[in-house]
Amino acid sequence: MNTASSLIAIALYLLATLLQVRRLQSDSPSGSQHLSRGSMASGLFAVVSHGVAAVTAIATPQGADLGLAQVLSLLSGLICLIILLTSFRRPLHNLLLAMFPLAALTLLIEVILPGNPDKGEQYSIGMYSHILLSILAYSTITVAAVQAIVLAGQDRMLRQHQLRGLPSLLPPLQTMEAMLFELITAGVLLLTLAILTGALYVENLLAQHLLHKTVFSVIAWILLSTLLCGRVALGWRGRTAIRWTLWAFASLLLGYIGTKIALLLISP
């Protein structure tokens, strides 16, 4: 693990958060509509440093170290990258006010609780592609789940005619909903590729204690795919979209955490 990169990324994440908070507190009408240049630059450099730290923590000379702290760190870095890139097209940037500090926290945990590279696994290129696609899919669906939670809060406040606070910081409800379905579509595509590569390259699911993780991943895929079909055929939206998205995210979370707990209990 590259500790220097981790510490640099933590400092830059906190700086980016502070700069965006100051922009939101400014009197500028565009303060809540755009990510400040300083925050954008700090965030991009933070993600790059985070990437170096996360990759070097996982790809060790002894093999792949996929400990909980290492995977969560990589996930949080990818989520920040996805939101940053998406914010060039869609105003998702205010989600970074929560994600930047969270990414800094996962890096800090990774520094304090380093992995065990001596138990690193040697994987084939195909297996590495499956792992990468799985993490990308989980990251995208996590962003969609966060988006769904924000959308639920925004919808509730608007129904109660609370026009200050959260609603004033976010795009219109229709735009937020469109962003949610874009994220879900991307998540389904990545999850499809992850499941297919897993079927091709993962050997003996029972021996590796990955069967229930696969089952929960397939359940999440079915839920999200059904939601997309319902959107096209039946016009599903609003609270229905929020519920189905959160159910799918919960399924992925249960599969991942369950696998980690099973491996911790079974491993000597």
Image (cartoon, rainbow, N blue to C red):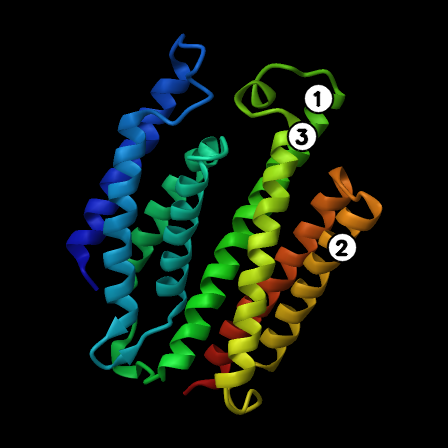
Task: Using the rendered image of the protein, determine whether residue 143 is visible from the camera's viewpoint.
Answer: yes
Q: Is residue 146 left or right of residue 48?
A: right
Q: Is residue 78 left or right of residue 195?
A: left
Q: Position of residue 129 (x, y in %)?
A: 41, 73
Residue 196 placement: quadrant: bottom right
Q: Residue at x 46, y 74 (%)?
A: 130
State which quarter of the image contains the C terminus. bottom left
What kind of element bears circle 1?
helix
Q: Nearer the viewer, residue 222 or 157?
A: 222
Which mark identifies residue 181?
none
Quote the CA–CA distance across marks 1 and 2: 27 Å
Q: Residue at x 69, y 23 (%)?
A: 157
Q: Spot the residue most to the front.
A: 232
Q: Which residue is mark 1?
A: 158
| Amino acid type assigned to the residue bearing label 3 in the image | Gln
Q: Nearer the viewer, residue 179 or 5?
A: 179
Q: Which residue is mark 2?
A: 229
| Amino acid type assigned to the residue bearing label 1 in the image | Leu
| Amino acid type assigned to the residue bearing label 2 in the image | Cys
Q: Which residue is mark 3?
A: 174
Badges 3 and 1: C-beta atoms under 8 Å apart? no
Q: Residues within 10 Å of mark 3 (few under 14, many from 20)?
A: few
What kind of element bears circle 2?
helix
Q: Nearer the viewer, residue 20 or 137?
A: 137
Q: Residues within 10 Å of mark 1 (few under 14, many from 20)?
A: some
